[in-house]
Image (tube, rainbow, N blue to C red):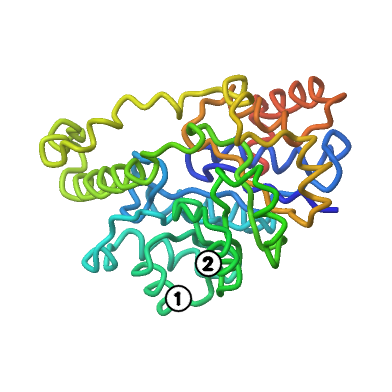
């Protein structure tokens, strides 16, 4: 039995995820049966190809090399969220994103895609990467989903509006190849989700271009709104600020007991935790909720916080 979890943000949550990987290795008895780290996903900012969540900041080569080495030495792949749906041909030559792919081009790491344009480019120029089909594609038709699973993808992330559509899920031909996003914070069946992904894509392109030209000048979001006023409607979306205690009532939420008692027996073993923009406390609650044994959750949380606060441990694993 395997429960392979894909964890959020190898850059912004770098130390958090490294310490968690160390804890899982040192104290496996705190965790539910079969828990593994399948990958840590995200991007090194300011990646123009990034999608799903706008990611700000700047990463230098030394940090990039260090993160790649730290996770890969533990056998943990980095999985790049190159899911920007607004890419054009001119964006394929982006120097920063190509540099990142070159540095991590060792056969272990992976890429999540939406754009056929970028997918074709990566398959041609970086054939060592395993390719994941993103939930951002919004595939909700049963027949289309089965067709997607049969394509040449390492993993297909299922649209989370299908999380409890067991008629559709039961028909999937290769369930081990499929990934379920278990803790979605977006409103179920949100009619604006695809448009929101597009808006995030435009913002990421604008931010990456700005940083490349003006490294020491703050990004002006108002200028972007003047150029793309359609983005304004998503400026105050509250969903990404939801805590674990907010999302458990959403109908697309998958509980830990459902993972082990329903989905794993069906043949699924890939589970994604979103949380690239979560604060540390919210992220801890999600990790403990999903992966720790219920009867040891409090002790596991305490042990994790103690490890996270121990500089000697952090230095030892970097």
Apparent side of residue 199 relative to residue 254 in the rendered image (left or right): left
Image coordinates of residue 193 in percent, x first then y, are 39, 41
Say if 167 sits above or below 255 in the image: below
Give me the residue at 53% from left, 35% from top: 275
Label of residue 211 in the image: none
In the image, 86 versus 168, the foreground residue is 168
Q: Residue at x 77, y 38 (%)?
A: 258
Question: Horizontal and vertical percent for residue 2?
Answer: 80, 53
How many other residues sit within 10 Å of disc 1, few (<14), some (14-19) or many (≥20)? few
Q: Which residue is mark 2?
A: 131
Q: Secondary structure at mark 1?
A: helix
- Give me the C-alpha separation between circle 2 and circle 1: 8 Å
Q: Quadrant of residue 182?
A: top right
Asked whether, in this view, residue 238 is left or right of residue 281, the answer is left
According to the picture, the residue beneath numbered tag 1 turns out to be 123
Q: Quadrant of the C terminus?
A: top right
Residue lying at 56% horizontally and 55% vertically, measured from the top left = 78
């Amino acid at each position: 039995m395997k429960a392979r979890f894909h964890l959020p943000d190898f850059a912004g949550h770098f130390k958090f995820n490294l310490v968690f990987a160390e804890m899982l290795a040192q104290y496996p008895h705190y965790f539910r049966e079969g828990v593994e780290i399948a990958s840590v996903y995200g991007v090194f900012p300011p990646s123009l190809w990034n999608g799903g969540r706008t990611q700000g900041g700047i990463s230098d080569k030394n940090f990039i090399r260090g993160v790649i080495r730290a996770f890969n030495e533990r056998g943990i792949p980095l999985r790049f969220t190159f899911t920007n749906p607004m890419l054009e041909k001119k964006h394929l030559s982006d120097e920063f994103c190509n540099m990142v792919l070159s540095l991590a081009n060792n056969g272990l790491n992976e890429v999540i895609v939406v754009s056929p344009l970028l997918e074709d480019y990566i398959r041609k120029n970086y054939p060592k990467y395993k390719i994941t089909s993103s939930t951002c594609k919004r595939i909700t038709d049963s027949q289309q989903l089965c067709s997607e699973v049969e394509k040449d993808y390492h993993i297909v992330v299922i649209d989370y509006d299908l999380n409890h559509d067991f008629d559709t899920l039961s028909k999937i031909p290769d369930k081990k190849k499929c990934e379920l996003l278990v803790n979605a914070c977006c409103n179920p069946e949100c009619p604006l989700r695809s448009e929101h992904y597009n808006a995030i894509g435009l913002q990421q392109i604008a931010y990456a271009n700005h940083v490349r030209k003006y490294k020491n000048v703050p990004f002006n979001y108002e200028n972007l709104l003047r150029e793309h006023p359609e983005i304004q409607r998503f400026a105050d979306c509250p969903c990404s600020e939801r805590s674990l205690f907010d999302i458990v009532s959403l109908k697309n939420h998958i509980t830990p007991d459902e993972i082990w008692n329903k989905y794993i027996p069906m043949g699924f073993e890939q589970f994604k935790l979103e949380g690239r923009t979560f604060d540390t406390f919210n992220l801890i609650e999600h990790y403990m909720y999903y992966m720790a044994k219920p009867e040891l959750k409090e002790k596991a949380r305490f042990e994790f916080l103690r490890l996270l606060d121990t500089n000697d441990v952090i230095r030892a694993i970097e």
